[in-house]
Structures are given as C-alpha cells and as structure tokens.
Amino acid sequence: GAGVSQTPSNKVTEKGKYVELRCDPISGHTALYWYRQSLGQGPEFLIYFQGTGAADDSGLPNDRFFAVRPEGSVSTLKIQRTERGDSAVYLCASSLVGWDGYTFGSGTRLTVV
Amino acid sequence: DAKTTQPPSMDCAEGRAANLPCNHSTISGNEYVYWYRQIHSQGPQYIIHGLKNNETNEMASLIITEDRKSSTLILPHATLRDTAVYYCIVRPSPSSNTGKLIFGQGTTLQVKP
C-alpha cells in the first residue's frame, strides 16, 4: 500500500485480556518501529526491527509486551494480561535503512476497561 | 541521547512565517537534528533533518547555528493546516542503524486566521 497501515484503528478490551495489534509497513521498508503515545505526551519508543529480528527492544516496558515480525514485513505487537495503564495510542512506523524519513501509521487506540 | 528543549506552545498568524526554536546544547558531533510534526489524531510526519548546514525542502527550512547548539524550523507561509505539535529530535546519522527517535513534549503551534 501507499502508507503504513495499522489495524484495528480502535480496540477496547477488558483488564486482564490479551490483545494483538497489527502493522503493515510500506512495501520494501526493512526497518519497522513501534511507539506508544499517552494523552498529551510525545511518542515513546518500544521496539525496532531490522528485517525479522528485533535490533532494539529496550523500550518494551515489561514482559507482558512482545512483538514479532516473522517474515520481515507485517509486525504484530502482543500485550498479555492488559492493565488500565496500557491504554494509549500504539503507533507503528517504517523506513528504508540508511534514510531516516520514518513513515508513521495513524495508530491503534487501545482502551483497557 | 542528546535532549532538546522547545517552548510548549506558539501562535502564528495565517500567511506569516512560523519560526519554531529548539535548543540542543549537548548535541554530539555525529548527531543530526530532525523535525517531525503531529497533526491531531494522526501519526507523526517527517519534515526535515540536517547536520550543520541549513536545509530546505518543500515543507520547511531548517536553520542550525554554527555551534550546533540550537536550531529553528521555519514554515515560510503558515496555513491553518500547519496547526500541529512540532517535535525537534537529535540522533545519530541515518546510517548508524540505531533506529529509535526520542520524542520530547514538542511545541504546539496554533495557526490563527
């Protein structure tokens, strides 16, 4: 597609449930990033993939958060045992290696009730 | 990562130039200055980046001081659609493969008719 696609655009889940958020990057972009943005704050880095491997996962807040990119294209962010504090907009971005014009998706708004 | 300081908010009249300042006094020699903006309910959008020379593209101009401790993003003829949060970020060069961007609070630019 022309841009980075994130699905679903909105997700409401109950505390304690498991959720998966999907990101379809721009075709050919080898680098993929996940960020999380709370209300009134700038985006917070979570994890960076180069191809299939996580090159930097230092931003994942705890072991309830996990992300995969098995074929080097689509990525899924997985959150186990969701907590109300996980409510945020989860942003995905992709880029070509060596050029830094990240393209962000519109995000998935996660609400944990 | 070097930190940046931006004013929390600015106003600009439509059709006038918007000059957004950023201080990055601890920037290292290999770190670039990047600007992104985020329009309400959208993901951040890349605007421009530079190392030490002034840069211009179709969206904006970036002026970096000779000592590289501060920079200014210039939107030459602001429109209502330029109302957004503008983020100034410093990080190593695109080829360094470190991936992540560290977003601060940014400057909320309000363009007024």
Image (tube, rainbow, N blue to C red):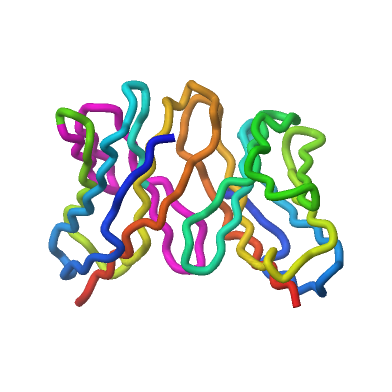
Q: Is residue B60 magenta?
A: yes
In the image, residue B30 sits, relative to residue A45, either above or below, namely above
Number of marks: 0
In the image, residue A13 sits, relative to residue B26, either above or below, namely below
Q: Is residue B52 visible?
A: yes
> In this picture, which residue range is highlighted in magenta?
B36-65
Residue name at image x 30 percent, y 49 percent: B5
Residue name at image x 35 percent, y 55 percent: B86
Residue closer to the observer: A26 or A67: A67
Q: Quadrant of residue B83?
A: bottom left
Give the image location of residue B34, x and y in percent.
Answer: 36, 40
Q: Is residue B102 magenta?
A: no
In the image, residue B64 sits, relative to residue A21, either above or below, namely above
Residue closer to the observer: A71 or A37: A37
Give the image location of residue A83, x and y in percent.
Answer: 76, 67
Q: Is residue B82 visible?
A: no
Give the image location of residue A87, x and y in percent.
Answer: 67, 68
Residue closer to the observer: A48 or B82: A48
Residue name at image x 23 percent, y 40 percent: B62
Residue name at image x 54 percent, y 28 percent: B98
Q: Quadrant of residue B17?
A: bottom left
Quadrant containing the C terminus of chain A in the rendered view:
bottom right
Left or right, B98 with respect to B67, comes to: right
